[in-house]
Every structure is written in C-alpha cells, then in structure tokens.
Amino acid sequence: MAITSQMTLLLSLFFSVYIHISASTESDFLLSFKDSIDDPLSLLASWSNTTTNHHCNWTGVTCIATKDGLSVSSLNLQSLNLSGEISATICKLPNLYHLNLADNLFNQPIPLHLSQCGSLETLNLSNNLIWGTIPNQISQFDSLRILDFSRNHVEGMIPGNIGLLKKLEVLNLGKNLLSGNVPFGVGNLTELTVLDLSENPFLASEIPTGISKLIKLEQLLLQSSGFYGAIPDSFKDLKSLSTLDLSQNNLTGVLPQSLGLVSLEKLVSFDISENKLFGSFPHGVCDAKGLMTLSLHTNFFNGSVPNSSTSGCLNLERFEIQNNGFSGHFPDGLWSLPKIKIIRAENNRFSGKIPESISMAKQLEQVQIDNNTFISKLPQGLGQVKSLYKFSASVNGLYGEIPHNFCDSPVMSIINLSHNYLTGPIPELKKCRKLVSFSLADNNLVGEIPHSLAAFPVLTYLDLSHNNLTGSIPKELQNLKLALFNVSFNGLSGEVPQSLITGLPASFLQGNPGLCGQGLPNSCGGNKSKHEVAGVSKMVSVIISLALSLAIVILIAGVYVMFRSSKQNSQMGAWRSVFFYSLRVTEQDLLVAMDDKAARGSGGAFGKVYIINLPSGEHVAVKKILNFESQSLKTLKAEIKTLAKIRNKNIAKILGFCYSSDALILIYEHLPKGSLGNMIASPDFQLSWDVRLRIATGVAQGLAYLHQDYVPRLLHRNVKSTNVLLDENFEPKITDFALDRIVGEAAFQSSVLSASSGSCYIAPESGYSKKATEQMDTYSFGVMLLELVTGRAADEKIESGEGEFLDIVKYVRRKINITNGAIQVVDPKISNSSAQQAILRALDIAARCTSVAPEKRPPMCEVVRALQSL
Ligand SMILES: *[C@@H]1O[C@H](CO)[C@@H](O)[C@H](O)[C@H]1NC(C)=O
Ligand SMILES: *[C@@H]1O[C@H](CO)[C@@H](O)[C@H](O)[C@H]1NC(C)=O
Ligand SMILES: *[C@@H]1O[C@H](CO)[C@@H](O)[C@H](O)[C@H]1NC(C)=O
Ligand SMILES: *[C@@H]1O[C@H](CO)[C@@H](O)[C@H](O)[C@H]1NC(C)=O
Ligand SMILES: *[C@@H]1O[C@H](CO)[C@@H](O)[C@H](O)[C@H]1NC(C)=O
Ligand SMILES: *[C@@H]1O[C@H](CO)[C@@H](O)[C@H](O)[C@H]1NC(C)=O
Ligand SMILES: *[C@@H]1O[C@H](CO)[C@@H](O)[C@H](O)[C@H]1NC(C)=O
Ligand SMILES: *[C@@H]1O[C@H](CO)[C@@H](O)[C@H](O)[C@H]1NC(C)=O
Ligand SMILES: *[C@@H]1O[C@H](CO)[C@@H](O)[C@H](O)[C@H]1NC(C)=O
Ligand SMILES: *[C@@H]1O[C@H](CO)[C@@H](O)[C@H](O)[C@H]1NC(C)=O
Ligand SMILES: *[C@@H]1O[C@H](CO)[C@@H](O)[C@H](O)[C@H]1NC(C)=O
C-alpha cells in the first residue's frame, strides 16, 4: 500500500513536471516562431512569457488536450499584416494540425520546410506575396488534406508529382501566375472535393482527362484561365459535382452528350459561359422526358426510368452558357426547375419556346436570352414568377401580344424585348414599381403609350422606338427622371411636352411626322426653325452613345446617373441638376451646405469654393458661378459633359452640376489632403524630394493629357498650386480646368484672368496675346515647379539681397545666373539630399518652362519625359 501511494505520488510528480516542461517548450517554440515574424501592428502582443497568460490563450492559438496535457493544435494568424519569415520551429509542435497564415504579407517562396510538420493537415497561405515555382518536393507534404496557395504570385508549371499528395481534399491554386499544362497526375488526387485553378491566365492546358477519376469532386473551378480544347466526355463521372465553373476560357467543340444528365444531379451552379463551345446542347438536359429517352439509349439508369422529381437538376440555381456558339433546341426542362435563379444564354443561336411551365420556377430572378432565335409567345406564366427582376430577350423571334400580367413581379427592374415581332398594344403596367429600364424597341406594337408608365418612380430608360404606336405623348412623362426617352419612328402625333425636348433626357422624337413642339419641324403654334431641329438631332446623336452607355452602366454595374429636376422648389428658384456619379444629395442639400463653415479660400474667380462632406463620407468641392455668359442650355450641358468625360488619374472628376437661370454650381471631386498650394503656404511644409517630384510629374501628365491626348484638346488656363489636389499617397489631381469653355471667353477673361492679373503664374505674353495657348499653361506649370523646388509659395515676395522684393520667377532667374546660385534657391529642407543632381535638373526644367519667349518652352509631354528621367 505504502509503495503504491509512493508510486502515485512519484508518478503525479513526474507528470506535473512533464506537463510543465512540455508546456514551456511549446511556448518557446511559439516565441521563436514569432521572433522571425514582423508584426507591425503588434497584434501578437499576447505572445509573451512575461505575462501569466498561458500560451494556449495567445492570439490565434488553439490547444487540444492530449494525454501529456494541453498542446497546440491550430494556429490561425490570418489577416494580421504579418511579414518576415515563416520559420520551421513551428514544426516542433507535435500536434499542430492547422496552420492558417492567409491574408498577410509573407513575401517568400513556398515554405517547403513546413513539410517537416508531421501532423499538419491544413496549410492556408492564401492571399500573401508567395512567389516562385511549386517545387517537386511539394510531394513531401503528404499529410496535408487542405492546401491553399491561392491569391499569390506562384508561377511555373504544376509539378506532375502533385499527384502524390494522396490525402488532399482541397487544392486551391487559384489566382496565381501558373503556366503550362495541368499534369495528368492531378487525376491521382482521388480524395479531392475542391479543385481551384481559376484565374491563372498563363495556363495553357486542356482539361486533363484524369479529372474524371476525382469522383468526390464537389467544386471544380477553372474559370478565367487558359484552358482550351474540348470538355472531356468523362465529366459524366463527376457525380458529386455541385459547382462547375469553366467560364472565360478557350474551350471549344461540342458538349459531350453524356454531360449534365448524371453530373447535373447534385449541381447547383453550372457556368461554361464565354468560351467557344458550339453545337446543340445535350438532349434532354434537366428534362424528365429527355432523361427517359436518353436512359433508354445509354442504359445508364439500368432500366428504372426516373420520374420527374428524381431527374437531375433539381438543385440547379445558376445556369450560364452565354457567349458561346450553341445552337439547336434550348433545354426546355430548365424553365421550370424549382430552385433555378439565373438563366443566361444570350449570344448563342438557340431555338425553342419559353413554356407556360415557367410559372413553376418560383425562385427565378434573372433571364437573359438576347440574340438567339427563340420563336415563342410570351407565356402568361411569366407574370406568376414573383422573384423575377430582369427579363432580357431582345433580338429573338418573340411574337404575339404582351400578356397583361407580364410586369407583375414586384421586383422587376429591367425588361428588354427589343427587336422581336410582338404585336398588339402595350398593356397598362401597374405592379412593377421598381422598373428602371423598359425597352420594346423595334416590334410591331400598336395603340397608345400607356399613361401608367408615368407613375413608375424610378423609370430611367424608356425605348419604344420603331413600332406603330399612335396617339400623343402623355404629358405626365415629364415627371419621370429619364436618362433616355426614345419614341422615334412611330406614328405619334400632337404636342410634345416641353421638358422632353429641352430637358435633360436624350430624347429621340424623329420619324413621327405628327409631333409638334418648339424646336421640332412642326411647331404647334406656327413659326418653324429647321436650323434648330438640325441642331437638336445632332446634339442628340452626339450624346446618344453616352446616354446609352450610362444607362447600361446604371443597370448592370449599379453605378448611377441621376437626372433630377426640382421645379417644385419655389423658394430657391428652379434648380435642375445633372449628376455624373451617384452623389445621393439633392441640389437643395448642396445649397444648404454651402455656408460659411464650408467656404474655402479667399474667393478668387467666381466667388467662393465650398468643401462639402457628403453623407457617403466623400468630399466634394462646390463652386458657385454667378456671372457667366448666357450660353444656351444645350451648349452649357454639352461643354460640361465634355469636361466630365475626362478620365485621367491626375485630373479631378467633375461629378455633376446644378443650374438655375442665373447661377451655375459645379461639383468637383475633392481630396481630404487639400491643395498643394495650401500645403506649400503652411509654415511646416516638409515634403521629401521624391514626393515633390511625384507631384510635379503627375501634374505634368495631367496637363499633357489635356493638351495632347483628350479629344477635344483642352487648355487648363488656370494652372496654379492651389488648383492641384493631393490624395493620401500625394498623387496629384488637377482641378478647375478649362472653365473658359463653361462660362464663355468674355466672362472667363473678366473674372479668372482679372482676379489673377499680376499673379506670377500668368505668362508674360498673356497681356498682349489674344489667343490662349498651351505655352501659357506650360509657363504656369513652370512656376508651380519652382514652388516645389524652392519650397516657397508663388505669391510670396522674396528679398533679393539688394533690398529689392522679387516674385519667385524673377528671384530664381536672377540667382541661377550667378555661380552656385542655383543651389541657393533650392529649399534647404531638401538641398542636402542625395538627389541634389536631380533637383538641379528639375530647376533647369522649371527655368525652361518659364522662359519669357513662349516658343522656348517645351511641350508638356516633353516635360513629362524629362521629369520621369529624374
Ligand atoms: C521565456 O521564458 C524562458 C524561461 O522562463 C526564458 O528562457 C526565455 O528567454 C523567455 N523568452 C522570452 C522571449 O522572454
Ligand atoms: C485562458 O483564459 C481563461 C480566462 O481568461 C482561463 O479561464 C483559462 O484557464 C486560461 N487557459 C489556460 C490554459 O491558462
Ligand atoms: C495592412 O497592410 C496593408 C498593405 O500594406 C495596408 O494597406 C493596411 O493598411 C494594413 N492594415 C493596417 C491595419 O495597418
Ligand atoms: C484560407 O483562408 C482564406 C482567408 O480566410 C479563406 O477565405 C479560405 O477559405 C481559406 N482556405 C480554405 C481552403 O479553407
Ligand atoms: C498515379 O497513381 C498510379 C497508381 O498509384 C501510378 O501508377 C501513377 O504513376 C500515378 N501517376 C502520377 C502521374 O503520379
Ligand atoms: C484563346 O486562343 C486564342 C487563339 O487561339 C488566343 O489568342 C487567346 O489568347 C486565347 N485566350 C485565352 C484566354 O487563353
Ligand atoms: C444494372 O443492373 C445490373 C443487374 O441488375 C447490375 O449488375 C449493374 O451493376 C447495374 N448497372 C448500373 C450502372 O447500375
Ligand atoms: C417520383 O419519385 C418520388 C421519390 O422517389 C416519389 O415520391 C414520387 O411518388 C414519384 N412520382 C411518381 C409520379 O412516380
Ligand atoms: C449574337 O450572337 C452571335 C453568336 O450566336 C455572335 O456572333 C454575335 O456577335 C452576337 N451579336 C451581338 C450583337 O452580340
Ligand atoms: C436592349 O437590347 C438591345 C439589343 O440587344 C440592346 O442594343 C440595348 O442596349 C438593350 N437595352 C438595354 C437598356 O440594355
Ligand atoms: C405599321 O404601320 C405601317 C404604316 O402605317 C404599316 O405599313 C405597317 O403594316 C404597320 N405594321 C403593323 C405591324 O401594323
């Protein structure tokens, strides 16, 4: 007895010591792992043995109880901004099963030494900066079940012996730079449930036939890579497949006739869009009847014919085969699947009907079958699908009348039935209050435009052109916020509501000889003006493409263009606005926000600029212009649109404008760091030379773009450092450009130029030259470059040393003509830097830009090259 109790004591002593040792060594391994890691945000602060915190409680550490006490089983250190080296000491943890270092900044080759981790089953290095090739030794990771190297820079071929990772269940190499052929050995990974090789644009491979051996595969993701050739016949063996994505490859050939029937059974998502596949779709896909015929031919179902509820596809939610060259009969069974949400087959040559049984597709959200040869009536059943939000079937052979319940889905927002053979009247549509885009163009519709259309609150795009509509245009349509209104080539007559002619929507009215109104060939009252009509249609055709592409962008990408009118506001006068981006404010919000708190600067040309913080958190700069030339509204809009279309990273965007009869409000993008001018003027102006050079180069690129690349070519005419905004990375954006085009030359001269007369930004020839030139912009740019080099604001007068006060240009000119003078003008904060040579060359560029003789100034594109060479 005594002996036993002594033994017990000894044993328990031994165990407690053992546990203690094992615990402290595990924490030492962790600490030594941490030693080689950079943890800039100190998110691993809890990893420390100075505290009493047990290492199993450290950030990201999970332990399991083993017979020897607690032991680390999992390290989850994802998304901690870690970098440095992944050290092999981690492998001394005997029970480490899971290692997740995803979403960090590890920048190294694949850490092969981790194959020493004998227990490791999961290795996740997704979304790091891992580079280099996958070495043959990858086969040493033979204990792994889950391997995720996705979203890195792994390159080269996939080694053949990857097939030796026999236990692998998940292999994700997506979004890397892999190249070449996918080895046959992949077919030996028979435990795989997920294989992701997507987004490897340099792969050039056929789909390896060995893939058919992966019978446990549930997800096969090969999209947006370089797969070519045919889809192998053996796909039919992938019976567990639920997600198949082969989209955006170079696959070609016909689909194997066996495809789908079996494999579709568990399939949820099927996407083979954007390939070069052709031929008819396998017979009877997702179709009970088809299944029967097929089963008799192939004997696959071994005599027992499945009934419709046991047939394939019952789980299918997504079916995307668009942008291929398929032909033949579209699989009928698809239309009535209980879970189907998306059917996309546009841009093929399918024939077929849309059956009444579509009403059974209770989850259907989106149908796109444009540009096929469906010959069908529109089924009544469509109106019973209450989840449908998009139905696009343009360019087909749809005929018959549009059913009255057609737009009954409460979420319906996009309907495109253009270029078909629909007849009869357009039914009064009432229930689809979310309708945004409605196109029935180029059918054989008769009757009147339904008045109910005017009641749709968000209708933006309405195209009824090329039909046989008669009657007048309902006045109520004026109330819509339309971006496009096209009723051309119908038999409409009567007076056109004024705002549909001169208002903001791109209006298409031609081809309706009976229509009358101001600016149309027939004016309802009497006097006509052919000239003006030509103007209207020209302007219309100029903005048609803009309007169309904007409309498409609204609908598809969710980017929003809103044309609002707010005639109802009597207090502030009638304001109208055009927003080129979604701002989610009204002109009233803007006017209210333009108070003294938001005002910036001392005013300058055209009064104050207001910086306004939008509900979205964005900043906009708002400039109110009072005295501008009364250009016609159309000219004004066209000019602002011209400027708003500029897309250059160094040019601030015009987000929109509002106008009333006597004022114009321009809305520019604004950046929270504010302007370069303010920065230079502040006493603690501190930017390094590299940053200054980047700013100068950016501004020069922006100007070169305006001068040379944009059509029409533009002049800025007001270059100065306060018109250069900086983003958080000090990338510059030029603002306030080409105002002359908006306000008119005379108003521009009298405000902008007079406000800055005497400013040293103005080129000397401006006083006598009638015409504005690129060289004048170059001069102003040169002055700004001098500000960057000298660290002095342009309007600061500088004591020359001889009791004289000079502006920056004269001062520099005088100094650089004396020995060693150049270096004296350089901002002392940067003059000692190693970049002294570059700084002096930049000073030389600035001096050339500010040459008195315009012809000696280099063009901006040359300035860009010169600055880049520094
Ligand atoms: C942790 O503690 C051990 C012994 O208690 C000591 O040897 C080691 O230096 C400590 N490590 C750190 C990083 O403080
Ligand atoms: C971890 O912390 C909790 C509470 O903070 C504590 O109850 C537990 O004992 C700690 N675990 C270890 C192994 O020290
Ligand atoms: C993490 O690193 C990224 C990239 O360097 C950086 O953009 C991000 O701000 C960092 N996150 C934090 C919280 O510092
Ligand atoms: C790897 O980690 C990333 C980031 O958390 C995660 O999205 C991904 O699903 C993980 N991979 C696997 C195979 O679990
Ligand atoms: C696949 O496995 C088989 C049988 O285990 C073997 O003979 C073959 O060499 C392996 N193929 C590859 C490419 O690894
Ligand atoms: C598809 O093939 C064509 C020529 O056959 C080639 O130009 C193109 O780059 C390939 N596209 C992809 C995504 O591999
Ligand atoms: C078909 O049935 C026969 C006998 O009933 C059976 O031996 C065979 O395995 C079945 N084939 C399939 C594919 O199920
Ligand atoms: C079809 O099969 C299901 C499940 O196997 C069964 O419940 C149903 O009664 C069958 N229907 C017919 C018409 O045979
Ligand atoms: C219509 O589809 C065919 C393929 O069937 C394609 O070649 C053609 O470009 C498509 N037309 C449009 C306008 O996309
Ligand atoms: C409607 O379809 C036609 C023809 O495919 C297309 O040109 C037009 O842009 C579509 N309209 C919308 C709003 O998408
Ligand atoms: C449309 O009107 C034109 C001219 O009135 C007529 O020739 C044509 O047959 C009409 N089409 C239909 C489908 O009614």
Image (cartoon, rainbow, N blue to C red):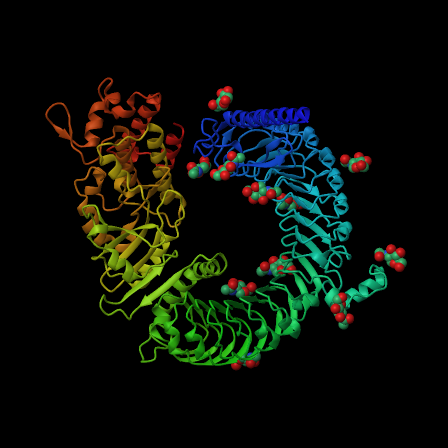
Quarter containing the N terminus: top right
Count the labels in the image: 0
Give left or right: position of 540 versus 106: left
In the foreground, 557 or 697: 557
Q: Which residue is pictured at 35% across the width and 51% down the height?
A: 617
Q: What is the x, y in percent for residue 234? A: 78, 50
- Left or right placement of residue 842 versus residue 53 in this view: left
Q: Is residue 3 above or below residue 762?
A: above
Residue extending farthest front: 1
Report if residue 861 is visible in the image. Answer: yes
Residue 530 is at least partly visible in this image: no
Return the x and y of residue 35 as percentages of the image width and height: 50, 25
Outermost residue toward the top?
Answer: 819
In the displayed structure image, the side of residue 625 where residue 556 appears, left or right: right
751 vs 611, nearest the viewer: 611
Quadrant of residue 763 within the rendered picture: top left
| x, y percent for residue 417 | 56, 70
Residue 533 image-quadrant placement:
bottom left
Where residue 318 appears, x then y in whole percent?
62, 59
